[in-house]
Amino acid sequence: MVIQLNPEPEEQDEQVLADFPADEQLVITRVERQKKSDHRYIIHFGTYQMTVHEDVMIKYRMITGSSFMKTDLEEIVVADERQRAYVEGLRYLERKPRTSQEMARRLREKEIGETIIAEVLVRLQQERLLDDPLYAKQWAEQRITNQRKGKLWIRQELREKGIDKLLISEALENITPEQELESALQTGRKKWNLIRGDVNDKRRKTGAFLMRRGFSGDMVRQVLNILREEEDFEGDEEEIYFPD
């Protein structure tokens, strides 16, 4: 038995309207709100029934006494699926921004067909509710400034979120070498001061720590040299002799 998780609109029509007659007028005999759903309604055509979102019901004037052919209802089923996907998308965006790939993955989990997913992504992008370039830029700034992560780490995170390689490069170009150095130096200095041991131990452990956080080898060497100079300077201060 094959289970279709992401049926296309045509297949959805067949599933929802499978028992509806194709050659006669279907008159709405009753409309009722679906239980446990504030925005979905059950539309009765005598012994037949289907459910639609409130917005779709209003758009197509699905009120008692209105009549439709099965071909009309097939169009309505597609419109309803499109509206359902859009509402799911808005709900997914309530907590935080998302990438286009994250949104597509979410809609697939809700068993939305690929054609409608593509349409909803375009709509959300046009409404600036999905904005991969802005997402990448803000993500990079937040990670480098607040999380103290290096560009290599940020690049990998954005790849996993489905951001295009070109957009990733543009986002990382907005981070200056001075910004990344400052981030690496702050997190490196904190680690350096926590390590008990000689300078070689501090260099080895701090360097490994910074590499794991996504800073490049050149950046790590630069930070380690600065930290070594700072430690030497502090040591010289302690040995200053003031004669009587």
Image (cartoon, rainbow, N blue to C red):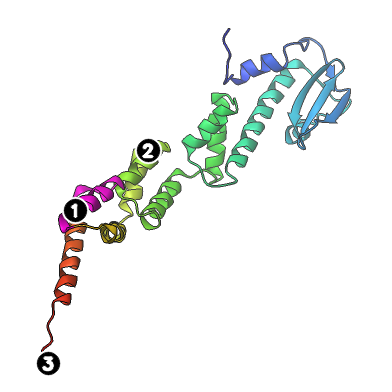
Asked if the residues shown at circle 3 and circle 1 are in contact, with their CB atoms under 8 angstroms apart, the answer is no
The residue nearer to you, when weighing 101 against 79, is 101
Residue type for callout 1: Asp
Magenta span has 213?
Answer: yes
Q: Which residue is mark 2?
A: 159
- Which residue: 33% across, 54% down? 174
- Which residue: 24% across, 47% down? 208
Secondary structure of the residue carrying tag 1 is helix
Asked if the residues shown at circle 1 and circle 2 are in contact, with their CB atoms under 8 angstroms apart, the answer is no
Residues packed near mark 3 inside 10 Å, few (<14), some (14 to 19) or many (20 plus): few
Secondary structure of the residue carrying tag 3 is loop
Label 1, label 2: how many angstroms apart (C-alpha)?
Answer: 34 Å
First-in-chain label (3 vs 2): 2
Numbered tag placed on residue 201 in the rendering? 1
Image quadrant of residue 162?
top left
- Asked if residue 214 lies left or right of residue 38, the reply is left
Residue type for callout 3: Asp
Instruction: Relative to 34, say whether 154 is above or below.
Output: below
Image: magenta residue range: 198-220
Numbered tag placed on residue 70 in the rendering? none
Q: Which residue is mark 3?
A: 244
First-in-chain label (3 vs 1): 1
Q: How many marks?
A: 3
Image quadrant of residue 111?
top right
The residue nearer to you, when weighing 242 against 210, is 242
- Asked if residue 36 lies left or right of residue 99, the reply is right
Identify the residue at the far top of this view: 1
- Which residue: 66% across, 25% down? 78
